[in-house]
Image: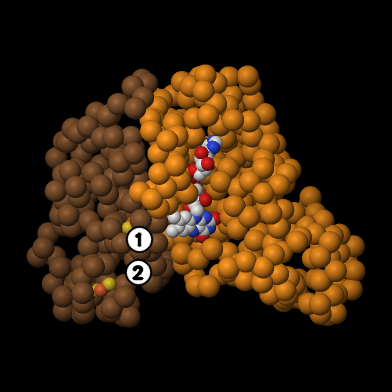
Chain colours: A orange, B brown
Amino acid sequence: MSVLLPGSLAEALGSLAADPDLVPMAGGTDLLVHWPQRTELHERSYLDLSGVEELRPHRWEADELVLGGLTTYWDIIEDRRAWNELPLLIDAARQVGSVQIQTRGSWAGNIVNASPAADGVPVLMAYDAVVVLDSTRGRSEVPLSGFYSGYKEMRRSPDELVTEIRVPRRAYDVQIFEKVGSRRAQAITKVGVAVTRSDAGWRVVANSVAPFVCRCPALERILEEGAAVGGPDDLLPGIREDVSPIDDIRSTAEYRENVLARLLYYDLLDLCPSFG
Amino acid sequence: MSDGRSDPLRISFTLNGEPTTVEVSPSERLLDLLRYRLGLTGTKEGCAEGECGACTVYLDGLPVDSCLVPAYQVRGRLVETIESLDPKGMAHYHARGTTQCGACTPGVVMTAEWIVRHPDRLETHTVRELMAGNLCRCTGYDGIIEGVEGALGDREAG
Ligand SMILES: Cc1cc2nc3c(=O)[nH]c(=O)nc-3n(C[C@H](O)[C@H](O)[C@H](O)COP(=O)(O)OP(=O)(O)OC[C@H]3O[C@@H](n4cnc5c(N)ncnc54)[C@H](O)[C@@H]3O)c2cc1C
Ligand code: FES
Ligand code: FES
């Protein structure tokens, strides 16, 4: 195994251009799990991002919050402005693992790790976040809702780093994040959902019910059109159109569909006149 | 600066207040460096996957699981282990049953003392939420929570 320790973004991108097989190392909370046993990972070459200081800070601009490529969950939990303006980022961050994971894990790592159960991704997607990718070839900006195309498949070329995640600052009148797991901390999500409403319309984003975290256009349409919803089961056809939950060690497809329907129904009951 | 590739990497950092320079292998975790090469065996390995918190140390003042930190990432940073804490400060944990078998205790005390040093965190978080990354098979957690509350109380009183 080997590792490169770049001290600047330009150097990191140059190294990655020269050797796109390098694996970027951020907080290591995905990459180092069971490290001693995962000897195949010791064969790889790594690009350590931790010395690229310019990737760490996040900043508030007039119309967006810009997360850096190394910004951690804890960096955002520490920012009281985020609690007021984009509270779903806080709700999700507090439910990622535990404090020891939140102080190390990065939002960009969550996006690129591309777990269908990721908790950072759904709230970012419900806020219409844009992923900024840089390489020596230039910059591309991809809406997070269009970033994934299959299980662990995404629009990132091997020579690109996620350098920013741009989150628009909008006024929201609905902001909901629900994570269902076996226990409150240190639990992988069985079913999760993030819902927002702003001038840009409704966003419904589900995790752990499809090969990747995704928006749910059929459910968004039901909310947009104000179609009558008399009970949780009325949401099932929309759910089946949007997602494809599976049976696995953590849960069953049937459980996931039903829980998703009930989470949405009871969370929205008081907010949507069409729900009764 | 780009260092050589598979070769050991020479890194400098501050360990429990002391400037420290060591060679690390690219595959070494902070936990391995501390326990097996620097002889700081107070930090324990429970799960090797970030679940149990037995390996908790402070990195730049924040609790992290040292089983998930590549050793090369601590270059230029501050690392503090359980050995840096004053044993005299442990009385309230003894008194309240925070420890039984002791396997989880170094990690538990590291997180607990971090809370005690930053009581402002309790404006937004409960002790239980902040301690959720430290698993314990013995105490049933009440002794841990009461230990932290006792230590917080002592600090306020003192
Ligand atoms: C005990 C435990 C509990 C956890 N609980 C949760 C949970 O509840 N919810 C959840 O969503 N996740 C959870 N995770 C997973 C993990 O913490 C998150 O996915 C985290 O956000 C990963 O970030 P990282 O910086 O540690 O990534 P790393 O492990 O460093 O990297 C992850 C992946 O992203 C790539 N990468 C990282 N940064 C970049 C970048 N800037 N550009 C390009 N590629 C990059 C890496 O090459 C790698 O493929 C948990 C992990 C552990 C160990
Ligand atoms: S050994 Fe590191 S968290 Fe369990
Ligand atoms: S005291 Fe035994 S595991 Fe906690």
Q: Is residue B113 visible?
A: no
Q: Position of residue A199 (x, y in %)?
A: 79, 52
Q: Nearer the viewer, mark 1 or mark 2?
A: 1
Q: Secondary structure at mark 1?
A: loop
Mark 2 crowdedness (10 Å alpha carbons): few <14, some 14-19, many ≥20: many
Q: Residue at x 28, y 78 (%)?
A: B138
Provide the chain ID for the residue under circle 1: B
- The image quadrant where one finds the N terminus of chain B is top left
Indicate left or right for B16 with B58 as reference.
left
For residue A43, which quarter of the picture?
Answer: top left
Q: Mark 2 — residue?
A: B135
- Numbered mark located on residue B47 in the image: 1
Q: Residue at x 71, y 64 (%)?
A: A245
Indicate left or right for B150 with A229 as reference.
left
Up-down relation of residue B124 to residue A134 (above or below): below
- For the residue with label 2, is its CB less than 8 Å from the closest atom of ligand 3? yes
Q: CA distance from mark 1 to mark 2?
A: 10 Å
Query: Front-most of A137 and B130?
Result: A137
Q: Residue at x 23, y 36 (%)?
A: B13
Residue at the extreme left of the image, as rendered: B88
- The image quadrant where one finds the C terminus of chain B is bottom left
Indicate left or right for B72 with A159 as reference.
left
Q: Position of residue A118 (x, y in %)?
A: 58, 55
Amino acid of disc 1: Cys
Up-down relation of residue A231 to residue A10 (above or below): below
